[in-house]
Every structure is written in C-alpha cells, then in structure tokens.
Amino acid sequence: MSLNYHWGFLIVPRQEKAKAVPGTHCHVKNSPRGWVYEKRAFTNTRSTASLLVRVVIAKITDKKRLLQILRQIPGLEAIKQDGKCVGTTILDWSTIEPMVREYAAAKTTNRRFTTGNMFTPKPTFNILERRETNP
C-alpha cells in the first residue's frame, strides 16, 4: 500500500514546555499558478488538525537564515550546503523519508489518527536521538 503525504518544514522552539507551542510552517503547495512557497504562523504546532506527525531533523542555529534559504530554494540540499543555519542535523532524504513513512504508518496502524485524536498533541519522533519524544 502506497501512502501519500504532504511534506513541510515546521520550525518550533527547542523547549516545548507550554500547552500551546507557536511555530512557523514552511512548504510549497500546488495552486492554479503552479507550485508556490508558503510560510504560515501556527498558534499551536502541537495539535494542528491537518498535521499527522512531527519529526525533528535539525537543531536550528539561525532561524532568519534558514527562512531565507527556504524562501529562495526550499529543500534539504540548500540547508546542507549553507552549513550555518542548523547545527546537529540529519538532512539526507534517503534516511529521513523511510523513517518518517514507517513512523506514520505505525501510528496509522495503531489508530492514532482517528477523528477524536486529531486535536491532541501530535506524535513526535526525534531522528537525531532515534527516539519518540511524544507518543
């Protein structure tokens, strides 16, 4: 079975101690004009209805620089080539994609995304630490 997902970058604070955690969502979307970059502020990135899972792939060291790169050339390769906007990171798509698909599939199998659960804090997997930080 092939599952299709929409991928994006979610920029959140390192420490998520509050019940509502604000953040920034960056992605490209298909519109009548073609693919368009979009940046949106979220008031609570922990429980957004359209979001299935969150995966930590980097520790951001320069948010302004990262946003500039994403706006110009969205993608992991541009972030990797810059080498200054993130610190500890895993930016290899061939590593990220299968891990995220497996994680999301396991959550789907365990019925984590049933209607009643869509506004609860999202499952979060930290690739850097190879562990789930929020089931």
Image (tube, rainbow, N blue to C red):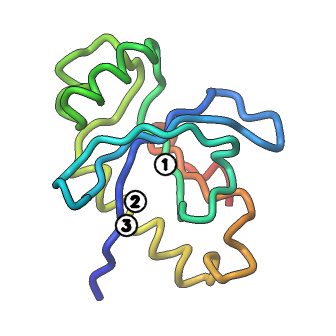
Q: What element carries label 3?
A: helix
Q: Disc 3 marks which amino acid?
A: Arg
Residue 78 appears at what percent x and percent y?
Answer: 19, 27
Residue 43 appears at what percent x and percent y?
Answer: 69, 41
Up/down of 126 relative to 112, above or below: above
Residue 55: numbered disc:
1
Q: Disc 1 marks which amino acid?
A: Val
Q: Residue at coordinates 26% horizontally, 25% vertically from top-left?
A: 79
- Cα distance, mark 1 to mark 3? 11 Å
Q: Residue at coordinates 67% horizontally, 50% vertically from top-left?
A: 46
- Cα distance, mark 1 to mark 2? 7 Å
Q: Residue at coordinates 67% horizontally, 70% vertically from top-left?
A: 118
Q: What element carries label 1?
A: strand
Residue 34 appears at what percent x and percent y?
Answer: 16, 55
- Cα distance, mark 3 to mark 2? 4 Å
Q: Residues within 10 Å of mark 2 (few under 14, many from 20)?
A: some
> Decide: marks 3, 2 in contact (CB < 8 A)?
yes
- Residue 65 left/right relative to 20: left
> Decide: marks 1, 2 in contact (CB < 8 A)?
yes
Q: Residues within 10 Å of mark 1 (few under 14, many from 20)?
A: many
Disc 2 target residue: 100
Residue 101: numbered disc:
3
Q: Give the position of the C terminus as an image quadrant.
A: bottom right
